[in-house]
């Protein structure tokens, strides 16, 4: 309603500003409580729509890595393994191939050391 008293208008405007400030504070508190709300469970919930698909992809990747591991056991040439390493795209594949290269090199060093020991004894 309209009032002609300037002092009363100031008090009304001041009260309106105070109500707006309190409303902003409540909104900020609500946002903060939503932002920092503790998780309902100890593990992160997966996106339920994509979960079966990601699970399937993960299983396929594990199967591919197992097959690659078996193939790497049969390879006895560092050069072949190096070619595979350069062609590999996935981190896990490269990791397996590098491990196979290290293993093969260690076996070569061990064989050379044994051969050296046999020659020195003769």
Image (spheres, helix red, strand yellow):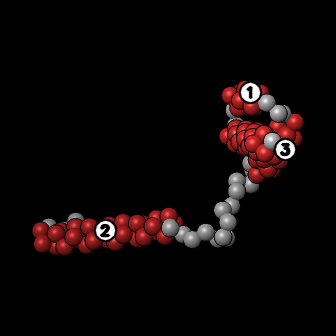
Q: Which is more toward the observer, 50 or 19?
A: 50
Crowding at dot 3, Cα within 10 Å, few <14 / some 14-19 / many 20+, comes out as some
Residue marked by disc 2: 21
Residue marked by disc 3: 66
From what the image shows, is residue 71 above or below residue 6? above
Q: In what element is the residue under mark 1?
A: helix
Asked if residue 60 shows in the view, the reply is no
User: Which residue shows up at 21% across the image and 70% down it?
Assistant: 14
Q: In what element is the residue under mark 2?
A: helix
The x and y percentages for residue 29 are 42, 70
Q: In the displayed structure, does residue 113 sit left or right of residue 15?
A: right
User: Which residue shows up at 49% across the image and 70% down it?
Assistant: 33
Mark 2 to mark 3 CA distance (whole Å): 62 Å
The x and y percentages for residue 92 are 71, 43
Q: In the displayed structure, does residue 95 sit left or right of residue 59?
A: left
Q: In the displayed structure, does residue 95 sit left or right of residue 74?
A: left
The image's mark for residue 79 is 1
N-terminal of the two: label 1 or label 3? Answer: 3
Mark 1 to mark 3 CA distance (whole Å): 21 Å
**Quarter that holds the N terminus:** bottom left
N-terminal of the two: label 2 or label 3? Answer: 2
User: Which residue shows up at 18% across the image and 68% down it?
Assistant: 9
Mark 1 to mark 2 CA distance (whole Å): 72 Å
């Amino acid at each position: 309603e309209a009032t002609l008293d300037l002092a009363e208008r100031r008090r009304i405007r001041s009260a309106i500003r105070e109500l707006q400030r309190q409303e902003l504070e409540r909104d900020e508190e609500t946002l903060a409580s939503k932002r920092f709300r503790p998780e309902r469970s100890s593990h992160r919930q997966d996106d339920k729509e994509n979960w079966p698909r990601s699970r399937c992809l993960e299983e396929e990747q594990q199967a591919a890595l197992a097959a690659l591991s078996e193939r790497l056991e049969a390879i006895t040439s560092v050069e072949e393994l190096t070619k595979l390493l350069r062609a590999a795209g996935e981190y896990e594949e490269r990791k397996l191939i590098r491990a196979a290269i290290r293993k093969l090199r260690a076996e070569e060093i061990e064989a050379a050391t044994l051969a050296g020991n046999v020659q020195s004894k003769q």
